[in-house]
Image (tube, rainbow, N blue to C red):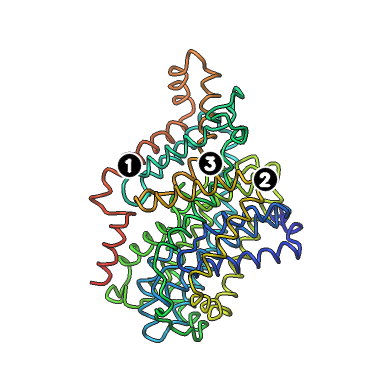
């Protein structure tokens, strides 16, 4: 425990100020429909260049956690999930708001989010060092297996067509090969451009895929200034504490589910909230109330999607494998500050790691305070005209991308990926697999080729010998194969897909 307190020395007043700023920005972004945590984090990564690593990373974590909670505000007040992870919150929060209890709904979402987030942080604190210690014993074969598992799991959780998810992932792998060969140092797929010698700039691609592309999608929709959404006033959110005792078991159970789902590479808060909500539907004593303003439904969905942050950060910090698309972008922030997430981070920068543990706990406390005290003011942002918001986001995208290396080439890269992201959205191709493939592809290639070079001429025999003497890699490969086979049964079971969400919604609404 004393080791974990090392990070306290890094939590200066300036760091705390940036954490507060990041949390406020995250809640605001999350509350505005169409703006996601991925967009916010990708746009803000370049703005952390001038900050010290602790300030920059904890500010982005504040945005990440805050946005995951903020989606519940618009889900409650105008029946539109601010972020995808709030889709299940909408089922009960909006009906409760229509009953004149918008304050109670937002209060319950806030309290559950904060408690779920704190549970995820506790898991992160105690499991990450253990996982990292085991991972330090990994050879290049185990690291290759972990990387390919992180990529293959996307086929299972990508919404819609599994084939489209795989196509997106393969495209990301192809883009990840551009630049110098990691083993031989030979330039590949640069097309004669010196700008591509170092490969595609990760942050520029992310801003294009999740920032500017969303602006393009939003601009396509017709804006009518005369149409105002139904809006319910937020009154007395502190009433939620009256129900804490009876919902404690639900919150703990949902937090456990959210943390586990969050630790699966590529899953995320949306999947976590669906799993927890479906679980609560089966365990509740009042199933007839679910989908009609049930506090149990709100608590389950929000506790799970915020606990997911801790689970995703567990795999990121201990293995260097992002748990979801946002943590994939966060790897870029670590790299910008000269850090590489993974087991070695615990050896070389444990003070920073412990500062992240403590900082995330503080962030969830800030979510509780800000959510209960300022929700009604943040809610007013929902009335900002969409054209104004799109203009601000466009400016941030261009300025942030240009600031990466001070050149227009990164802006061109961003525009290319923005158009690509727009087209992928139109044809229902998931964008998250590209993110994870860009991160995990080079890791997978480097470790595979290193292992092959060590066992040159005897690769297959060495592989089976390794499986018999060190079964960890064999287990990971088996899990990877299962993750590729399971989507074949997804249509029958309807899990984790848009159809699955629709089925749950219809079941709830009777």
Horizontal side of residue 427 vs 393, given as left or right: left
Q: Is residue 149 above or below residue 123?
A: above
Quarter of the figure that contains the N terminus = bottom right
SS at mark 2? helix
Helix or strand or loop: what does disc 1 sit on? helix
Rendering quarter of residue 60:
bottom right
> What is the spatial separation of the Cα atoms under label 2 and label 3, in whole angstroms?
19 Å
Q: In front here: 434 or 366? A: 434
Q: Which residue is depicted at the point 48% across and 13% down?
A: 457
Residue 218, by quadrant, is bottom left
Task: Name the one closer to the observer, 464 or 105.
Answer: 105
- The spot of residue 501 in percent (x, y) is 31, 61
The disc placed on residue 49 is none
| Above or below for 199 versus 227 | above
Which residue was labeled with disc 1? 163
Q: Which label belongs to residue 405?
A: 2
SS type, badge 3 = helix
Task: List x then y, in percent, for residue 374.
Answer: 58, 78
* Image quadrant where one finds the C terminus: bottom left
Q: Are marks 2 and 3 in contact (CB under 8 Å)?
A: no
The reply to whether dot 1 and dot 2 touch (C-beta < 8 Å) is: no
For disc 2, the neighbor class at 10 Å (few under 14, some 14 to 19, many from 20) is few
Q: CA distance from mark 1 to mark 3?
A: 20 Å
Image coords of residue 29 (percent x, y) = 53, 66
State the residue in front, 387 or 117.
387
First reached walking from the N terminus: tag 1 or tag 3: 1
């Amino acid at each position: 425990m004393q080791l974990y307190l090392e990070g306290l020395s890094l939590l200066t007043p300036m760091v705390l100020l940036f954490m507060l700023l990041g949390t406020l920005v995250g809640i605001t972004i999350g509350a505005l429909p169409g703006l996601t945590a991925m967009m916010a984090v990708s746009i803000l990564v370049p703005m952390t260049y001038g900050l010290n690593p602790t300030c920059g990373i904890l500010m982005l974590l504040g945005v990440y956690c805050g946005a995951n909670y903020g989606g519940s505000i618009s889900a409650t007040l105008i029946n539109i999930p601010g972020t995808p992870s709030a889709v299940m919150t909408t089922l009960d929060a909006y009906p409760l708001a229509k009953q004149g209890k918008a304050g109670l709904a937002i209060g319950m979402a806030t309290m559950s989010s904060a408690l779920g987030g704190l549970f995820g942080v506790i898991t992160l604190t105690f499991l990450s060092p253990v996982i990292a210690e085991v991972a330090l014993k990994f050879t290049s074969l185990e690291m290759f297996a972990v990387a390919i598992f992180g990529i293959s799991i996307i086929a299972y959780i990508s919404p819609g067509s599994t084939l489209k998810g795989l196509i997106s992932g393969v495209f990301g792998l192809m883009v990840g090969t551009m630049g110098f060969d990691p083993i031989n140092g030979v330039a590949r797929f640069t097309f004669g451009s010196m700008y591509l010698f170092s490969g595609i700039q990760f942050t520029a691609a992310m801003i294009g895929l999740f920032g500017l592309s969303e602006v393009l999608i939003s601009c396509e929709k017709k804006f009518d200034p005369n149409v105002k959404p139904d809006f319910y006033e937020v009154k007395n959110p502190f009433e939620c504490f009256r129900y804490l005792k009876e919902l404690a078991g639900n919150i703990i159970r949902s937090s456990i589910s959210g943390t586990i789902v969050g630790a699966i590479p590529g899953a995320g808060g949306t999947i976590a909230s669906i799993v927890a909500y479906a679980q609560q539907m089966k365990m509740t004593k009042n199933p007839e109330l679910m989908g009609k303003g049930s506090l149990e439904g709100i608590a389950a969905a929000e506790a799970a999607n915020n606990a997911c942050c801790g689970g995703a950060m567990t795999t990121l910090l201990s293995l260097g494998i992002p748990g979801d698309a946002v943590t994939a972008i966060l790897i870029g922030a670590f790299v910008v500050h000269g850090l590489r997430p993974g087991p070695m981070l615990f050896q070389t920068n444990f003070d920073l790691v412990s500062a992240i543990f403590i900082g995330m706990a503080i962030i969830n406390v800030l979510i509780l305070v800000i959510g209960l005290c300022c929700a009604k003011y943040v809610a007013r942002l929902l009335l900002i005209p969409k054209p104004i918001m799109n203009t601000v986001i466009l400016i941030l995208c261009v300025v942030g991308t240009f600031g990466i290396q001070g050149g227009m080439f990164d802006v061109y890269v961003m525009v290319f990926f923005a158009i690509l992201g727009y087209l992928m959205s139109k044809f229902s191709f998931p964008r998250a697999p590209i993110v994870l493939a860009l991160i995990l592809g080079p890791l997978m290639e480097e470790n595979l080729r290193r292992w092959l070079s060590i066992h040159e001429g005897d690769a297959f025999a060495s592989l089976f010998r390794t499986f018999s003497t060190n079964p960890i890699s064999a287990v990971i490969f088996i899990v990877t194969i299962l993750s590729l086979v399971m989507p074949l049964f997804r249509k029958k079971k309807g899990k984790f897909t848009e159809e699955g969400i629709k089925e749950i919604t219809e079941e709830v609404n009777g």
